[in-house]
Image (tube, grey):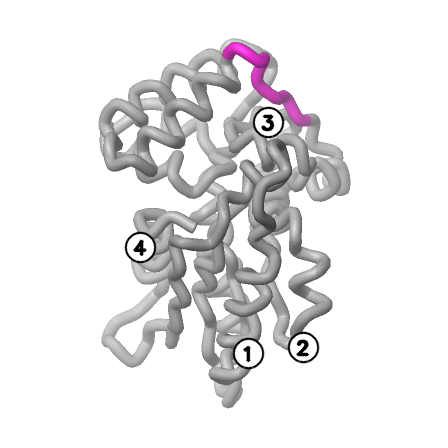
Amino acid sequence: MGPLATVDFMQKIINSTPAQKDQDHLPLMAYSIPQIPDRSACLLKHQASPLPALIKGVNTLTTAGVGCIAIPCNTAHYWYPALVESTSTPILHIARACAEALHAEQIRTVALLATDGTLKAGIYSEYLAHYGIALEIPSPTVQNRVMEGIYRVKAGHIQKGGEILESCMAEMLNGPAEKVILGCTEIPLALDRIHSELRPFSMDATNALATACIQWYQSLAGSTEGNINLSRVG
């Protein structure tokens, strides 16, 4: 997965942790391997599967003794069932964390900006439906622009990518959606780079996952298993 998104995820955990000193922060172990095959290319174009590399990452972290794994890549959650089967270590789910956060805000209708692979995989549908939250997805024209924006961010053109993604978000907010899920970990960092005025109308999936990590750690206060792996396995 993208290294920028990995750093963004870790920063969000740090920023959201109620800490007064270093020792109050979560112990983190990051496994960041950008060479893992492209998730969307696998799902849409039948190119190399990232699953073996994802399982290798999960096994590496499990062997290292982490107590919980978080994967800050939305599309990688297509392989979530196989990853869960490959380890005894609990793995948090980014869509579940996002749906729970939306439910807590009493949101009833959302739009989703994500990769083609995430949309095809339907990663969010089940968890949103569980809470009775309706889902709006972009038209093919808007989705093409979403992908352009995401890949511009991955290429280091964050400003331009953010401008494209902001325009896509604005279009989705013209419909019934109360908020827009930022369902690709490159999207929030791009919108933040351009200081988007639409950010209050977004649900940052990366931040929702970071919050879930903190809640997991706090639930184990005093436990000897207090390690969280930021598994950028993908």
Q: Position of residue 125 (x, y in %)?
A: 71, 36
> Mark 1 and mark 4 in contact (Cβ < 8 Å)?
no
Q: Which amino acid does label 1 sit on?
A: Thr
Q: Which amino acid does label 4 sit on?
A: Val
Q: Which amino acid does label 2 sit on?
A: Ser
Which residue is label 3 attached to? 110
> Mark 1 and mark 2 in contact (Cβ < 8 Å)?
yes
Q: What is the spatial separation of the Cα atoms under label 4 and label 1, in whole angstroms? A: 21 Å
Q: Is mark 2 on a helix, strand or loop?
A: loop
Task: Give the label, 2 or 3, closer to the camera.
Answer: 2
Q: Which amino acid does label 3 sit on?
A: Val
Which residue is label 4 attached to? 7
Task: Give the label, 4 or 1, closer to the camera.
Answer: 1
Q: What is the spatial separation of the Cα atoms under label 4 and label 2, in whole angstroms? A: 26 Å
74 lies left or right of 190:
right
Which residue is label 2 attached to? 88
Precedes in sequence: disc 4 or disc 3: 4
Closer to the camera in the image, 99 or 19: 99
Q: What is the spatial separation of the Cα atoms under label 2 and label 1, in whole angstroms? A: 8 Å
Q: Which mark is residue 62?
A: 1
Q: What is the spatial separation of the Cα atoms under label 1 and label 3, in whole angstroms? A: 35 Å
Q: What element carries label 1?
A: helix
The reply to whether residue 221 is visible in this rendering is: no
Residue that appears at 51% across and 57% down: 71
Mark 1 crowd level (few <14, some 14–19, many ≥20, 10 Å Cα): some
Q: Give the range drawn in magenta.
A: 135-141
Task: Give the label, 4 or 3, closer to the camera.
Answer: 4
Q: Where is residue 113 in the image (x, y as percent from the top left)?
A: 51, 28
> Mark 2 and mark 4 in contact (Cβ < 8 Å)?
no
Residue that appears at 49% across and 72% down: 218
Precedes in sequence: disc 2 or disc 1: 1
